[in-house]
Amino acid sequence: MRFWRLRGYLHEPRERLTRLLALTPERSQARAKAIFTVAVLATHQGNLAATSAFLEEGLSLAREIDDRWSVAYMLQLKAGVAWRQGRYDRAVELGEESLSGMRALGDRTGIGIVLWHLASARCQSTNRLSRCTRSASPWVTSWVTRI
């Protein structure tokens, strides 16, 4: 995947994974992770509609099979989509749900990523972006201490 991402060839892995998913309808953890990967690729391509569609399918599957890792990371990506669409309150809501999952998993990297995005979404949702930008370090630090 790194090869394709660095060279900007994101269409190829996305097309391959999408075809593979169509051929293998098995409801499994591997499928959930493949759906997450396709959603990430669609996000990098700027196709938020496709990202959202993949995330809906992936979240449904991940919850069905109790794949907590996929649920937490898909919620984090879904929060990112909401943020990009200017739906900051929804991004905070999804981010908080993702954060809960990351904490349950003990995924410190995931927790850090979610807290960073939550800080940004909270700044946007409260119209305090300029203040948050000037004092980003203390703001993020206050969130990171919640780990």
Image (cartoon, rainbow, N blue to C red):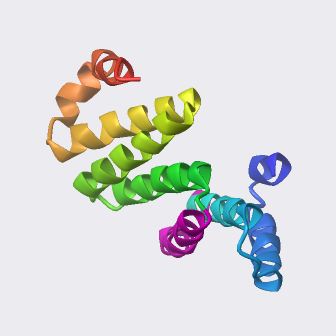
Q: Is residue 82 left or right of residue 125?
A: right
Magenta stretch?
A: 44-65
Is the residue 138 above or below the residue 15 in the image? above
Where residue 145 sits in the image (x, y, percent)?
Answer: 36, 17
**Residue lying at 61% horizontally and 56% vertically, measured from the top left:** 67
Residue 79: quadrant of the picture: bottom left
**Residue lying at 54% horizontally and 69% vertically, measured from the top left:** 47
Where residue 18 sits in the image (x, y, percent)?
Answer: 74, 76
Is the residue 96 above or below the residue 134 in the image? below
Where residue 85 sits in the image (x, y, percent)?
Answer: 34, 62
- In the image, 133 versus 100, the foreground residue is 100
Q: Main secondary structure of the magenta part?
A: helix
Q: Is residue 30 magenta?
A: no
Where residue 126 sits in the image (x, y, percent)?
Answer: 14, 42
**Residue lying at 43% horizontally and 59% vertically, measured from the top left:** 81
Number of dots carrying numbers = 0
Q: Is residue 62 magenta?
A: yes
